Image (tube, helix red, strand yellow):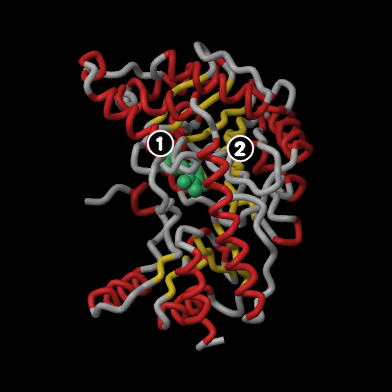
């Protein structure tokens, strides 16, 4: 009954951990959840207000356009200019997405032929690996190793694979390893893509969640647009994961092909949500800075606490995660933490090279983080 493609998808690994967490919750045991990458802080009030007002406008009640309102795309272009110093053409080089996950999946259908390879980072966001399978392609993992600063080693990808590769995924600031990228790295990637006829898909969902690091995009590399598509979203920057709005930016040819796929798949992002997003992008960005300061304080408390418990860890430079190296199996480690009511994500869930790590999402208050550290003291 089930399709061959669906059968090829990797198994879900956390059945047992989930069951155990659910059981504990049912027993009324308090769980401190560092598992999901979903901000606990609400969407800023001025954005919520704009949404309520937009809902009253009759013209917003009809189907949106496939590529998004021009005003939304203009607001994205303005933000890109201000934050990254990059010029993009709102009419030809931007398309709205129903959250970036949607685009990360659908983009493969625009460019992959049967048997084409897709290079994806391991550990990494699971969609980079599953989407190519749906589109008839072959995902090929590129390890992100600590020794190489969690950057892909482009030299090490076998030549035969590079020849057959059509798309390469990169993601900085990186989920789950928290690494940030410098422009030099992006330059190397763009050169590699151009030499080998590969389209770089750069997932920049955490572009604005950085600590003492400048805002970076691969589009800061001269001419990158011809071979790159950037995926970004309002989800993490403005605590809008539940709103489902993102965008892709790239050269005209790339975006045109992508748009053609989407006209056959969905009917765009709600006009109401787009109006709220326009306000988010065009208003003062103080709320973004405040957000980052909240994560910074949580990060510092967690890192200091873990060090006191004897763990080795550095302060992450980007994202709202902590990628902690642990002894032994990551699932077993997570299980031990769950015994004291602390839930983290085992690294193996992000791929084979995530083994030996667990991920903490900094989506709990400082008080809860302190409490989690106290509980961990009982077992370490
Ligand atoms: C959260 C996240 C996204 C964004 O997802 P949306 O669909 O825009 O909410 C994309 N990539 C990574 C790596 C993420 O962690």
- For residue 99, the mark is 1
Residue 319 vertical placement versus 248 (above, below): below
Badge 1 local density, few (<14 within 10 Å), some, or many (20+)?
many
Lateral position of residue 254 relative to residue 210, left or right: left
Q: Residue at x 65, y 79 (%)?
A: 308
Mark positioned earlier in the residue sequence (2 or 1):
1
User: Which residue is labeled 2 in the image?
Assistant: 165
Residue 360 vertical placement versus 104 (above, below): below
Lateral position of residue 135 relative to residue 311, left or right: left
Marks counted in the figure total: 2
Q: Residue at x 75, y 36 (%)?
A: 183
Lateral position of residue 309 relative to residue 32, left or right: right
The residue nearer to you, when weighing 288 against 274, is: 288
Picture coordinates of residue 102 (x, y %)? 40, 36
Whether disc 1's CB lies below 8 Å from ligand 1 is answered yes
Picture coordinates of residue 101 (x, y %)? 43, 40
Picture coordinates of residue 273 (x, y %)? 33, 28
């Amino acid at each position: 009954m089930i399709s061959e493609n669906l059968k090829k998808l990797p198994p879900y690994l956390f059945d047992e951990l989930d069951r155990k967490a659910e059981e504990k919750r049912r027993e009324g045991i308090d769980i401190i959840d560092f598992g999901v990458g979903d901000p606990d802080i609400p969407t800023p009030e001025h954005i919520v207000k704009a949404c309520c007002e937009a809902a009253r406008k009759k013209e917003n009640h009809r189907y949106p356009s496939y590529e998004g309102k021009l005003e939304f795309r203009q607001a994205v272009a303005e933000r890109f200019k201000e934050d990254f110093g990059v010029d993009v053409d709102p009419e030809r080089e931007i398309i709205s997405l129903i959250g970036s996950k949607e685009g990360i999946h659908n983009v493969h259908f625009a460019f992959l032929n049967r048997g084409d390879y897709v290079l994806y980072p391991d550990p990494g966001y699971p969609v980079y690996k599953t989407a190519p399978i749906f589109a008839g392609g072959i995902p090929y993992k590129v390890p992100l190793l600590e020794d190489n600063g969690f950057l892909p080693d482009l030299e090490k990808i076998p030549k035969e694979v590079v020849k057959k590769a059509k798309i390469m995924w990169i993601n900085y600031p990186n989920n789950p390893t928290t690494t940030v990228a410098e422009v030099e790295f992006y330059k190397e990637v763009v050169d590699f893509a151009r030499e080998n006829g590969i389209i770089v898909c750069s997932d920049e969902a955490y572009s604005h969640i950085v600590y003492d690091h400048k805002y970076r995009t691969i589009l800061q590399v001269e001419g990158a647009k011809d071979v790159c598509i950037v995926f970004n979203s309002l989800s993490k920057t403005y605590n809008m994961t539940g709103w489902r709005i993102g965008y892709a930016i790239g050269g005209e040819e790339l975006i045109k092909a992508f748009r053609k796929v989407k006209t056959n798949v969905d009917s765009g992002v709600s006009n109401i949500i787009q109006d709220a997003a326009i306000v988010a992008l065009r208003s003062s960005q103080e709320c973004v800075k405040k957000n980052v300061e909240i994560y910074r304080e949580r990060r510092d408390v967690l890192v200091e606490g873990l060090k006191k418990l004897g763990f080795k860890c550095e302060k992450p430079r980007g994202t709202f995660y902590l990628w902690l190296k642990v002894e032994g199996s990551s699932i077993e480690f997570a299980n031990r933490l769950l015994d004291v009511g602390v839930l983290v994500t085992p690294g193996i869930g992000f791929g084979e090279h995530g083994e030996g790590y667990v991920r903490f999402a900094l989506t709990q208050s400082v008080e809860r983080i302190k409490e989690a550290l106290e509980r961990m003291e009982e077992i370490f």
